Amino acid sequence: METELAVQVEQRITEHKLIASGDVVVVAVSGGPDSVALLHVLFVLSERHGWKLIAAHVNHQFRGEESDAEALFVEELATSMGLPCEIGVINVPAYIEETSLNGQAAAREKRYEFLHQVAAKHGAKRIALAHHADDQAETIMMRILRGTGPAGLIGMPERRLEKKVELIRPFLRIYKTDIVNYCAQHEMLYCMDSSNLLRKYFRNQIRLDVMPMLKTYNEQFPESLNRLADLMQAEDDYLGREAELVFRRITTLRPGCCRLERSDFTELHLALQRRLIKLILNCLCLGMDRLDYGRIERIRELIVQHQVSNQILQVDEELYIVREYEAIQFQTAAPVPKSYSYEIGPATSELYLPEAEAKLHFSWMQVGSPETAIHFSSATDVSLDLDQLRLPLVLRSRRSGDRLEPHGLNGSKKVKDMFIDAKMPLSRRDVIPLLVDASGQILWIAGFRRSKHALVGPDTERVLHMKLVLQ
């Protein structure tokens, strides 16, 4: 006679189509009560549904004889049910030393790798994992403590496609006490993993200390966390679909590049703005490590700021956000800068440089006038002897081979090398304006350094004063 737990699991599998009739299913069996019960339940149901089960176990070689004994136990259990069994022996401690991963992360990576190998060998489309409702509650609690967004509150998915194989968790709505009771009811033996008692692992601290403490405030705390996961799953599905619709409507995607109009973005709700940024980064095949809150907010703020017209934000070595007036472009390669050049004449009093997000003020004066007394030279101010200049002057972006003869130093130096020495960000080097006279002589790198030419001295009669103001 089938127990209530088996009926509940069968109903869940049928309603949510976790396993189809006749499927080949790899069942991950550690030897603990959860996986032993899962194998048994699926075995009981397999005759009616025509499932072909393969037990799979990984000996991580963490616990010596204990690990070996678990592998033997799983093999004998599968044999008693007439099921094929695949045992993987992996030296995880050596892999940890090689990769510097923490123990649980390394074990998980190699375990899943082995399970996929078994699935490929047997032509299985499903890998069944024994995570249960208490595991789910612990996962959500861990994410809350580490800091998570709404998507993290979903916890582990009941089903997830990975490498064209679906990972399923038929026990995700079943609690540990019901699983242990099931094993007792069927007089099933199982192994106890001694590492589950080690508090050096974060999950064990949550299971052994945090959850029992919080249950003193709410006896149904695990159930509350699982209800939260269900609620957030629905919310996440809805927002995910909305973000997909917005993505298709307002973005243009090309290899390594995604473009949108700022006005379309700013009309979106804040939640959709953040979702859209994450979706764009995923579409550009950038890793999840780039989706932290601070990084998303920096990108979003660049887009929504009203006073910014042109800017390049280098998020990291593979992500650049280029804003050109109302156009926003996400790209995985460094932007090729657009050169610019503006001619300056005696009638010029002000010049706006959108490329540099700066404005320059010009004062053309006779020595002895009241204005000349208040002007001086600094990084953002420069005074030049007009009679030593060859007009017209030009403000332009840097070019290959540009050299400056710095004031106070002998000889000349490449502008490129000066920027490198000053550790100037790459995104700024090609937008900083250079003041050049008609002979091609660089007189001033605005906001950075002036040359030794056209210095104002005792014999100066006419002065050109320029002031750089960043917008």
Image (cartoon, rainbow, N blue to C red):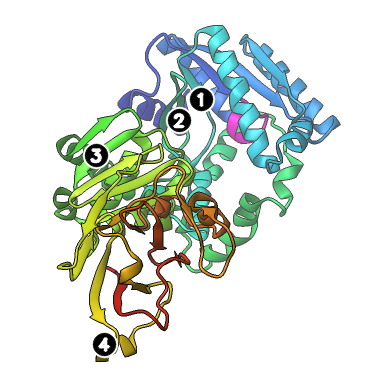
The residue wearing badge 3 is: 259
Label 2: state its secondary structure. Answer: loop
Indicate the amino acid at tag 2: Pro
Residue underneath mark 2? 170
Per the image, the residue denoted by label 1 is: 128
The alpha-carbon separation of the residues under discs 1 and 4 comes to 82 Å
Label 2 CA crowd tier, 10 Å (few <14, some 14–19, many 20+): many
Query: Residue sitting at 44 percent across and 52 percent down?
Result: 292
Q: Would residue 270 be seen by someone viewing this image from the given angle?
A: no
Q: Residues within 10 Å of mark 4 (few under 14, many from 20)?
A: few
Q: Of the residues shown, which amino acid type is indicated by label 4?
A: Glu
Q: Is residue 364 above or below residue 419?
A: below
Specify few, some or many for label 1: CA neighbours under 10 Å numbering under 14, 14-19, or 20 or more.
many
Neighbour tally class for label 3: few under 14, some 14-19, many 20 plus, Cα within 10 Å:
some
Mark 2 in CB contact with mark 4 (< 8 angstroms): no
Q: Are marks 2 and 1 in contact (CB under 8 Å)?
A: yes
Image quadrant containing the C terminus = bottom left
Q: Secondary structure at mark 4?
A: helix
**Quick check: 101 above or below 353?**
above
